[in-house]
Image (cartoon, grey):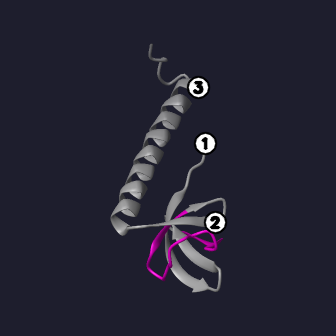
Amino acid sequence: MCIAIPSKIISIDNILAKVDIMGARRDVSIILVPEDVAVGDYVLVHAGFAIKKIDEAAAQESIKLIREYEAMLDLADAEAEKQACGLTPPQT
């Protein structure tokens, strides 16, 4: 299974772009993107390569879903830690 993260292009230098990935900045190759991209565009990034240009609405919706998933994982981790410490009995 592959996952691509929506990222906003901050700057472009030839075939490399600096992108903002949910607050983290990384350099990625834009050589695989079939469409022209510009600063301010959103792209899907996988393994250091931008692979597709997407619109801002799609990017924001994906970021929202990722943040919701992260929040659920944090809650599950906190519950598992409580159970491991004997603070709450396991739920069946």
Tell me the residue that label 1 is attached to: 1
Residue drawn at point x = 50 percent, y = 25 percent:
87
* Position in image of residue 32 (x %, y %): 62, 68
Q: Position of residue 19 (x, y in %)?
A: 55, 73
7 lies above or below 12: above
Which residue range is magenta in the image?
Answer: 24-44
Q: From the viewer's perspective, is the residue at label 3 or at label 1 nearer?
A: 1
Q: Residue at x 37, y 68 (%)?
A: 56
Residue closest to the far bottom: 13
Of marks 3 and 2, which one's residue comes earlier in the chain? 2
Secondary-structure class at tag 2: strand
Question: In terms of image quadrants, where is residue 59?
Answer: bottom left
| Of callouts 2 and 1, the N-terminal one | 1
Judging by the rendered image, the residue that carries numbered circle 2 is: 49
- Mark 2: amino acid: Phe
Q: What residue sits right under mark 3 in the picture?
A: 84
Amino acid type of disc 3? Ala
Disc 3, disc 2: CB below 8 Å? no
Residue 20 horizontal side relative to residue 64, left or right: right
Single out the residue that lies furthest toward the front: 34
Q: Nearer the viewer, mark 3 or mark 2?
A: 2
Residue 57 vertical position relative to residue 65 in the rendered view, above or below:
below
